[in-house]
Image (tube, helix red, strand yellow):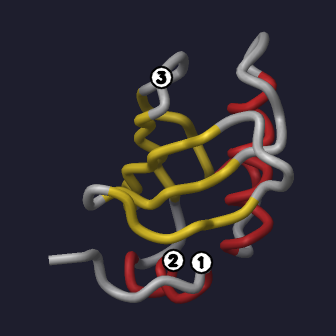
């Protein structure tokens, strides 16, 4: 199991991985930050992008914050970064 630390930006034009932001993976979310909709979109997006079942992607912390920690089962960190189109974090 791995954990990804994300910087999420809700209310964007589309849901996409933007790159690195302060050592965190920056993801823009199309959904507004209302009633957990952005979190639902985030977890579904990650499940699809990483090619893992939705049940393997869990929001560990940051339910109401932009900085979120997501646990992913069944994938190594280097695989996850490659599938998201990212290289190693900024130094």
Marks 2 and 3, how far apart in space?
Answer: 22 Å
Q: Which residue is mark 2?
A: 80
Q: Position of residue 12 (x, y in %)?
A: 77, 45
- Write the residue at 42% across / 78% down: 76
Q: Position of residue 91 (x, y in %)?
A: 14, 77
Q: Earlier in the sequence, mark 1 or mark 3?
A: 3
Q: Position of residue 40 (x, y in %)?
A: 77, 34
Q: Of all residues shown, which one is farthest toward the front?
A: 13
Decide: is 25 above or below 6. Answer: below
Q: Secondary structure at mark 3?
A: loop
Marks 1 and 2, how far apart in space?
Answer: 6 Å
**Camera-side mark, 2 or 3:** 3
Left or right: where 72 falls relative to 33 = left
Nearer to me, 46 or 34: 34
- Write the residue at 47% across / 80% down: 81
Query: How busy is the neighbourhood of tag 2: few (under 14 within 10 Å), some, or many (20 plus)?
Result: some
Q: Are marks 1 and 2 in contact (CB under 8 Å)?
A: yes
- Write the residue at 66% across / 51% down: 28
Decide: is 1 above or below 78. Answer: above
Q: Of all residues shown, which one is farthest toward the top?
A: 35
Q: Which mark is residue 84?
A: 1
Q: Of all residues shown, which one is farthest toward the left?
A: 91
Q: Position of residue 19 (x, y in %)?
A: 49, 71
Marks 1 and 3, how far apart in space?
Answer: 22 Å
Q: Earlier in the sequence, mark 2 or mark 3?
A: 3
Query: How busy is the neighbourhood of tag 1: few (under 14 within 10 Å), some, or many (20 plus)?
Result: some
Q: Secondary structure at mark 1?
A: loop
Left or right: where 60 falls relative to 45 = left
Q: Which residue is mark 3?
A: 65
**Camera-side mark, 1 or 2:** 1
């Amino acid at each position: 199991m791995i954990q990804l630390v994300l910087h999420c930006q809700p209310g964007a034009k589309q849901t996409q991985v933007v790159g690195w932001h302060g050592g965190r993976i920056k993801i823009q979310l199309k959904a507004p930050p209302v009633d957990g909709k952005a979190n639902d979109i985030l977890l579904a997006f990650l499940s699809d992008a990483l090619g893992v079942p939705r049940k393997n992607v869990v929001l560990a912390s940051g339910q109401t914050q932009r900085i979120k920690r997501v646990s992913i089962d069944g994938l190594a960190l280097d695989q996850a970064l490659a599938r998201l189109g990212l290289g190693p974090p900024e130094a």
